[in-house]
Image: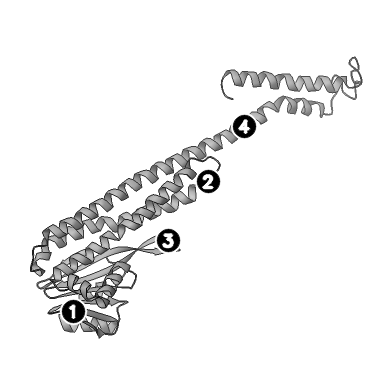
Amino acid sequence: MYVTVAEGAEAVSCGRLTWINIEKPTQKALEFLGMKYSFHPLALEDVVSKIQLPKVDKYEDYLFILIHYPGFKDGGKLILPTQLSIFLGKNYVVSIHQGDVKPISDMFKACKEDEQTLQTIVCNSAGYILYHLLDRLVDSFFPILDNLLRELEEIEDKVFDEKIEAVREVTILRRKIANLRRIAFPLKRVVAEVAKEVNRFSSIDLTTYFEDIQDHVDKVWATLEECKETIEIYKDTDFVLNTERTNKILAILTIVFTLSIPATVVGTLYGMNVNLPGGVETGSWDFLGPYTTFIIILLVSTIPALLMLWYFRRLRWI
């Protein structure tokens, strides 16, 4: 059965079990929860706070669970944590978020529109509803990781292509991975804590179910660790290749400058206002024709440059 219990709060129920889903919580919806279930004011305050760390608060007759989920901004370039709050009692589950936790919204919509889905998820126990919530949430990480791995493959060609700059792409991807790690790491602890308490709110033993969720969380974390190591390799590789490219450019410019030193010295000397052999004041040489002085100056400039070039090659500098 589906009902609207308060402004912004919807509920599906099966027998005595109720799942209330609140997207973009309003003050009226929170007041309704406080009156109906007597939730602690500090827990309700944490629901609307955007700076809370993931945690599990244990009360006498319910659990308050706060976890983070990856939200996307700037067309998927930026991943930021979005908050999901869950109250778990004997015969109810309350999920509260800002409408950007798509797996939960889709699951609630399916229960609302499909009787068979409602029977499967809601008509068991509150702990079993929580299992489905967390299972959907954790499984939704895998498409995100698939996209991340695909981006890593695409960026690999850019990193090892000397003609393409990949610094920006590597930096953006490193930030994505770091943000996902900050979201996934606390999830391991939260799921482990919930697994110890969830059987209080279930008529069946859910240990195996939550072990399966923990296994999925471990796989998510292992994949993120692998992505972190890979992107660090790409970062170091890109830095080394860029440094090598810069060193090559500097080496070429240095060699060109070095080879031009003899011509610069000779040209500087003959540009001085002093008498020099073959100069205008002393009379130019003509034993090789009218361009004798020019030819000799070219030879004096070129021969040292060629000798330096030969010496550099012998030292394997070029």
Tell me which amino acid carries mark 1: Ser
First in sequence: mark 1 vs mark 3: 1
User: Can you give x and y, in whole percent of width and height, for residue 223 in the image?
Assistant: 30, 49
What residue did someone put label 4 on?
252
In front of the other: label 4 or label 2?
A: 2
At 53% from the left and 46% from the top, the residue drawn is 165
Q: Give the Cα distance between marks 4 and 2.
A: 21 Å
SS assignment at label 1? strand
Labelled disc at residue 165: 2
Left-right relation of 239 to 117: right
User: Can you give x and y, in whole percent of width and height, for residue 33 in the image?
Assistant: 20, 81
Tell me which amino acid carries mark 4: Ile
First in sequence: mark 4 vs mark 3: 3
At 21% from the left and 73% from the top, the residue drawn is 116
Left-right relation of 34 to 23: left
Q: Badges 1 and 4: C-beta atoms under 8 Å apart?
A: no
Q: Badges 4 and 2: C-beta atoms under 8 Å apart?
A: no
SS assignment at label 3? loop
What residue did someone put label 1 on?
13
User: Can you give x and y, in whole percent of width and height, for residue 231 in the image?
Assistant: 39, 46
